[in-house]
Image (spheres, rainbow, N blue to C red):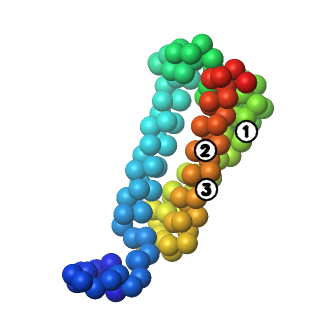
Amino acid sequence: MDSTTPRQPGKPVTGAPEGGSGYRIACVALLGAAALVGLYAALTLAGVLENRCWLEATTGRPCIACGCTRDFALLLSGRAPRWNPESGLFFALACAEILWRVVGTAVRRMPRAAIEADVAVHVVLIGWLLSKSLARIAGA
């Protein structure tokens, strides 16, 4: 049974389809979100928007990404980051994410294993970011 064949009531689904249009839509949406983050960073660096971390404004403690906007600009200009020691890691992850989303958008049918790996990697990364953020908020 492929994704175009309607499921018949009472019959079990024997095989899940590979990722098609839904995954591509998600990739396009995430590329759009990355473009908005890039636009925000550019407008902040140009002085059009105020560079303010909502977590720091709320708790008085910087988040784990504080300084990354300035550091990304330094990295793009070939200089070393100065504000956040984890900026290089974040920059590499952001580049890998954008590249993967471009691939996910270009591939007509992404294999199910690739989608599962994508989700698993993001669950681990989100858990890591949350744990680091909570530790920073707690003052550890």
Along the polypeptide, which appears first: circle 1 or circle 2?
Answer: 1
Along the polypeptide, which appears first: circle 3 or circle 2?
Answer: 3
State how many labels appear: 3
Residue 121's tag is 3
- Tell me what residue is drawn at x 62 percent, y 31 percent: 133
Q: Which residue is mark 1?
A: 88
User: Is 129 on the left or on the right of 35, as rendered?
Assistant: right
- Whole-percent x and y of residue 37? 49, 36
Q: Are marks 1 and 2 in contact (CB under 8 Å)?
A: no
Helix, strand or loop status at disc 2: helix
Residue 127's tag is 2
Q: What amino acid type should be assigned to the residue bearing mark 2? A: Gly
**Classed neighbour count for the residue bearing mark 3: other residues with Cα under 10 Å, few (<14), some (14–19), many (≥20):** few
Helix, strand or loop status at disc 3: helix
- Tell me what residue is drawn at x 58 percent, y 58 percent: 120
- Tell me what residue is drawn at x 62 percent, y 47 percent: 125
The quarter of the displayed image where residue 73 is located: top right
- Whole-percent x and y of residue 100? 56, 58
- Tell me what residue is drawn at x 49 percent, y 63 percent: 104
